[in-house]
Image (cartoon, coloured by chain):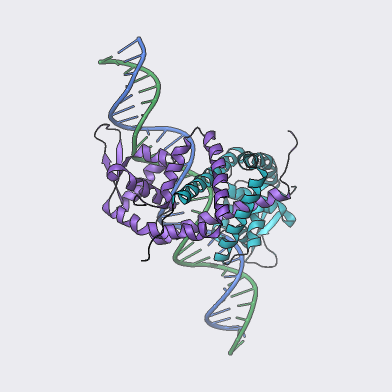
Chain colours: A purple, B cyan, C green, D blue
Amino acid sequence: MSEIRWLDDDEQRTWRAFLSATRLLWAQLDRELQAEAAMPNSYYAILVLLSEAPGRALRMNDLATATQSSPSRMSHAIGRLEKAGWVRRESCPNDRRGWYAKLTEEGLATLEAAAPKHLLSVRAHLFDQLSRDQLRQLRQISEVLLSHLSSLEGVDEECVTAATAAAVAPAEL
Amino acid sequence: MSEIRWLDDDEQRTWRAFLSATRLLWAQLDRELQAEAAMPNSYYAILVLLSEAPGRALRMNDLATATQSSPSRMSHAIGRLEKAGWVRRESCPNDRRGWYAKLTEEGLATLEAAAPKHLLSVRAHLFDQLSRDQLRQLRQISEVLLSHLSSLEGVDEECVTAATAAAVAPAEL
DNA sequence: CCGGTTTATTTCAGCGCTCAAGGGAACGGC
DNA sequence: GCCGTTCCCTTGAGCGCTGAAATAAACCGG
């Protein structure tokens, strides 16, 4: 085993600050969304994607790849969303293996009620805290990391960001 | 309801890049730690904290507050770690309500085997990707967010960062 | 066609987490 | 001393997720 280069003091501090900050930020946003809309972040993202899709419906697989999640996960998620009355499954006419997940009126209403509040959370805990310069830096840093990470998994970078873009607001944005 | 100020194009891009990057980074680090050490990040952090503690033991409550998690979560977590043979519960002599979680030899060995690999992951996916300037910026940004978020919850900021510091390497660092 | 592969989705077991509820020990005013 | 409160920890149900296996339909070379 080659010599181990541990983190120096500066790196330590950077690492732990980053770790804590992102963890707390996620937790906070999740908590607020849970309180406001009774759903986790991931389900919110699904609803947004559906709201933007033509006919407010998407194939299961497309949903899964768009949100960077497994088919299994999507199946469970849609199951729950269906139980909540926000989504309905509809069989696909061309391909009898396939299913559409379609946003219901109720689901759309829920989403539209949740979106402004979620936006406020994001502003309060991220955008309002940082200077214009810092936001620019954060964006560049994120893009570097993103391009590295998505290359790792043979994933289309555009696809990832496009999908996650959803996580902030529904179609009317 | 007052006028809603949606995210502009620049903000959108910043937000989604940040969102995707942190999500993918966490996922990647978790995946690698899972593959190398068969444990999630949170359990790793617990083992590191224990390895640094005097007598390699800590009270349940101290562990919980140090890792910013609920007593319940810690109870479950130590239960699993105990089942894995990495930790042992020992009753507290002074306070018969209390329990110590004590790192076993086996647990320490597991941790020491995992630490260098985990460090490599962190370097590969974060530190090696960013310039010196960007690392400095990232640190400042994280610290701003951290101080905001920890003030929200009436939490001691030092405590949070101190605990998370652990998440990179065991005592001998 | 027919048989094997690929594609689309579900199912199941199990993990880590949260939240609400509870037991048991210590503390503190009366 | 006693009773209520507080503190420490556990329990159990349920949620969101993962990974592997199963089903079932479409595709495709022979």
Q: Position of residue B164 (x, y in %)?
A: 64, 54
Give the side of residue B11 with respect to residue B79, left or right: left
Would you say residue B107 is visible in this rendering? yes
Give the side of residue B78 with respect to residue A83, left or right: right
Q: Position of residue A9 (x, y in %)?
A: 73, 50
* Vertical comparison of B61 with A79: above or below: below
Q: Position of residue B54 (x, y in %)?
A: 74, 57
Q: Residue at x 41, y 38 (%)?
A: A65
Question: Could you tell me how many numbered marks the image carries?
Answer: 0
Task: Give A118 or A60, whichever is nearer the viewer.
Answer: A118
Q: Which of the image's four quarters has the N terminus of chain B?
A: bottom left
Q: Residue at x 37, y 37 (%)?
A: A61
Task: Give A88 or A157, whichever is nearer the viewer.
Answer: A157
Q: Position of residue A157 (x, y in %)?
A: 48, 37
* Vertical comparison of B32 with B139: above or below: above
Would you say residue B76 is visible in this rendering? no
Give the side of residue B41 with respect to residue A2, left or right: left
Quadrant in which residue D22 is drawn: top left
* Vertical comparison of B128 with C19: above or below: above
